[in-house]
């Protein structure tokens, strides 16, 4: 007889499964753990004397995850006679698990205040990977010989088993702290603690700190120095809801092992004043460096700090770094409401990935490759591989290099669309869908091929004022009135005509007079609107293509009429929601498609997605589950185009 624990999950990565296996192995309980069909099934030998103790340990130590849902248990007739094995095929970049955080803050631990603390199931391990197979000699830790205690841990059942980057103060990585006049090193508990104390006090003194974390360089500073790239790091879990207005799902997401970036509503009036909006991108400390810095900042009475992604040459008053080569991934940004959760962008957690049926194809997109390996497709950064034998290569349009004699070009929107088909396993099923990343695109999958029904139309800023002026009778007066009544905006639009590669929403943000002249700025402005409905913005098509001039002319008209920028911003996304719905429903009827697919980063917008949810209530759209909905998914879809 077996005791079965069944955990529902919407994610295909196996770090939670491995975490459970590590705990089970530490109790030497015979068990079988499998992950399939959106479930993790753990079947235990129900006769084992330590079963309850093991289950209690799992309940207490298992990290919270964005993707874990409900669980249930029952008994089943099964014979279990062996220990489960950890699947440590590749590393990931994750936040620290509860056990590693506790160890790092335990004064009696060998890793007290050691910022490289992690285990085989957590931490920024991926950043140190150079090549496969994933073993220590193929990582940045190859020159660091583990001490006897660390070596023993790697062969002992538990969370450190098979941990190829295991280290501690005795055998670990020294860190240095530099400013213009002094330099100090840390290589033991006391010196590490002092180093983080000094760094925290420097931030309190309004200095800027460039910190090389295990997730890459980050520039920390007081919130008053914020800019458009600033992210708010909440460092005191007990005080998060004092400063942010969060639904339960958002609070749990911030503290999850995935440590995503969320766009949330501010409650703290001081922060609202500083950021100039009611929302901010927010994160909770993920790796050892950020957690220890946050610990010292809390001692100084600080609940939050500002930071931005940086590089080694970013200017700062003080620098904390170390001499290990690092290749970090991009943080994931999560879209979340009470009904839906998906990854908007970023490659952490989703990659590397080993799944889907093997096919003799090389897919190349955004420095990632998909290639056949051991019966499945393996997706990871190109730099980790030397060569592979395949029949053909599918390469994203913007790539210049030749990888194969039989090489074909793939388009971003088509590849993203196909990635959703692959994730949901609906090959052969007719689908229509939309891709939205600056420019809208509409696609159709006939069960074999992806076709662009309404291809994206690149925004051309070189004669945008002229296009608006000749749009229809009287449109020239619209441009004249803009020049007369809003000269600063008009001048910016004139200057825009000489720039290269201008995005549509850059022009939109300029028209709205926003400081952040990007889609991000328009999104933040839309979040200020608290009404129930907006106004209709012109999102019609001309010659079967989105009409940029009509769209921008409509915004100008409302601007001149004195409509507030928050209502206008909200209305833009609401109108886009109706635009997408109308075309998708029409295409679905004409093609007799069974499913609707949505992809592209711009769908991760509360105003737009809420409208899409309402409009598509009877035909809920399919989206990526384990991969981002943005450009990062192209390497997956490229395999099957």
Image: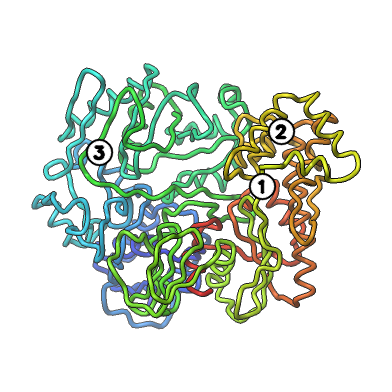
Mark 2 or 1, which is nearer the eye? 1
| Residue at the image point whose x is 22% and y is 55% from the top | 139
Location of mark 2 (residue): 512
Outermost residue toward the left? 148
| Residue at the image point whose x is 49% and y is 33% from the top | 230
**As drawn, 107 above or below 422:** above
Label ID, residue 625: none
Which mark is first along the chain, 1 or 3?
3
Counting other residues with Cα less than 10 Å from the Cα at mark 2, is it few (<14), some (14-19), or many (20 or more)? many
Q: How far apart in space, not on screen, are marks 3 and 1 (Cα)?
A: 59 Å
Note whether residue 503 is visible. yes
In the rendered image, residue 121, in percent from the top left (x then y), is placed at 32, 57
Pointer 3 and pointer 2: residues touching (CB < 8 Å)? Answer: no
In the rendered image, residue 476, in percent from the top left (x then y), is placed at 85, 37
Q: Quick one: SS at disc 3?
A: loop
Nearer to the camera, 212 or 166: 212
In the rendered image, residue 219, in percent from the top left (x then y), is placed at 38, 32
Which mark is first along the chain, 1 or 2?
1
Location of mark 3 (residue): 106
Q: Is residue 474 left or right of residue 615?
A: right
Location of mark 1 (residue): 460
Q: Is residue 326 left or right of residue 10?
A: left
Q: How far apart in space, not on screen, are marks 2 and 1 (Cα)?
A: 19 Å
**Quarter assignment of residue 273:** top right
In the rendered image, residue 232, in percent from the top left (x then y), is placed at 49, 33
Nearer to the camera, 539 or 106: 539
| Residue at the image point whose x is 24% and y is 67% from the top | 28
């Amino acid at each position: 007889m077996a005791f079965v624990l069944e955990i529902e999950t919407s994610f295909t990565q196996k770090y939670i499964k491995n975490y459970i296996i590590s705990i089970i192995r530490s109790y030497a309980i015979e068990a079988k753990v499998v992950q399939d069909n959106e479930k993790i099934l753990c079947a235990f030998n129900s006769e084992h004397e330590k079963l309850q103790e093991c289950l209690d340990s799992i309940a207490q130590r298992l990290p919270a995850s964005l993707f874990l849902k409900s669980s249930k248990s029952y008994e089943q007739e099964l014979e279990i006679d062996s220990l489960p094995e950890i699947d440590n095929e590749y590393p990931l970049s994750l936040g620290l698990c509860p056990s590693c955080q506790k160890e790092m803050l335990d004064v009696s631990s060998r890793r007290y205040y050691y910022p490289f603390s992690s285990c085989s199931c957590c931490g920024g391990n991926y950043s140190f990977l150079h090549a496969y197979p994933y073993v220590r000699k193929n990582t940045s830790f190859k020159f660091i010989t583990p001490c006897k205690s660390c070596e023993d841990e790697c062969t002992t059942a538990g969370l450190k088993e098979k941990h190829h980057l295991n280290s501690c103060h005795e055998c670990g990585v020294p860190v240095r702290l530099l400013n213009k006049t002094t330099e100090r090193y840390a290589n033991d508990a006391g010196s590490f603690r002092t180093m983080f104390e000094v760094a925290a006090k420097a931030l309190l003194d309004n200095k800027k700190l460039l910190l090389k974390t295990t997730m890459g360089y980050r520039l920390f500073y007081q919130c008053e120095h914020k800019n458009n790239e600033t992210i708010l790091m909440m460092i005191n879990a007990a005080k998060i809801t004092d400063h942010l207005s969060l639904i339960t799902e958002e609070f749990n997401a911030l503290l999850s092992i995935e440590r995503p970036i969320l766009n949330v509503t501010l409650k703290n009036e001081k922060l609202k004043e500083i950021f100039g909006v009611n929302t901010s991108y927010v994160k909770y400390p993920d790796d050892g460096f950020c957690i220890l810095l946050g610990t010292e900042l809390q001692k100084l009475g600080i609940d939050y700090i500002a930071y931005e992604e940086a590089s080694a040459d970013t200017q700062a008053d003080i620098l904390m770094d170390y001499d290990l080569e690092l290749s970090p991934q991009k943080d994931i940004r999560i879209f979340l409401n009470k009904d839906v959760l998906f990854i908007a962008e970023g490659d952490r957690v989703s990659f590397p990935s080993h799944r889907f049926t093997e096919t003799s194809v090389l897919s190349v997109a955004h420095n990632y490759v998909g290639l056949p390996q051991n019966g499945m497709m393996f997706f990871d950064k190109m730099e980790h591989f030397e060569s592979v034998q395949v029949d053909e290569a599918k390469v994203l349009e913007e790539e210049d290099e030749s990888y194969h004699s039989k090489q074909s070009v793939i388009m971003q929107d088509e590849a993203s669309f196909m990635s959703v088909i692959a994730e949901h396993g609906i090959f052969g099923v007719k689908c229509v869908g939309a891709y939205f990343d600056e420019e809208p695109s509409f696609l159709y999958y006939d069960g074999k091929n992806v076709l662009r029904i309404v291809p994206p139309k690149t925004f051309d800023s070189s004669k945008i004022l002229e296009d608006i002026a000749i749009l229809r009778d009287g449109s020239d007066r619209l441009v004249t009135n803009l020049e007369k009544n809003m000269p600063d905006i008009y001048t910016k639009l004139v200057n825009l005509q000489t720039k290269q590669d201008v995005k549509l929403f850059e022009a939109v943000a300029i028209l709205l007079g926003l400081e952040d002249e990007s889609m991000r700025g328009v999104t933040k402005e839309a979040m200020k609107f608290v009404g129930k409905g907006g106004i209709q913005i012109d999102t019609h098509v001309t010659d079967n293509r989105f009409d940029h001039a009509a769209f921008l002319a409509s915004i100008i008209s409302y601007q001149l009429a004195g409509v507030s920028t928050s209502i206008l911003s909200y209305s833009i996304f609401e109108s886009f929601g109706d635009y997408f719905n109308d075309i998708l429903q029409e295409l679905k009827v004409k093609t007799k498609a069974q499913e609707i697919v949505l992809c592209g980063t711009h769908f991760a917008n509360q105003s737009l997605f809420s409208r899409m949810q309402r409009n598509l209530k009877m035909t809920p759209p399919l989206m990526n589950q384990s991969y981002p909905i943005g450009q990062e998914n192209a390497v997956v879809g490229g395999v099957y185009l």
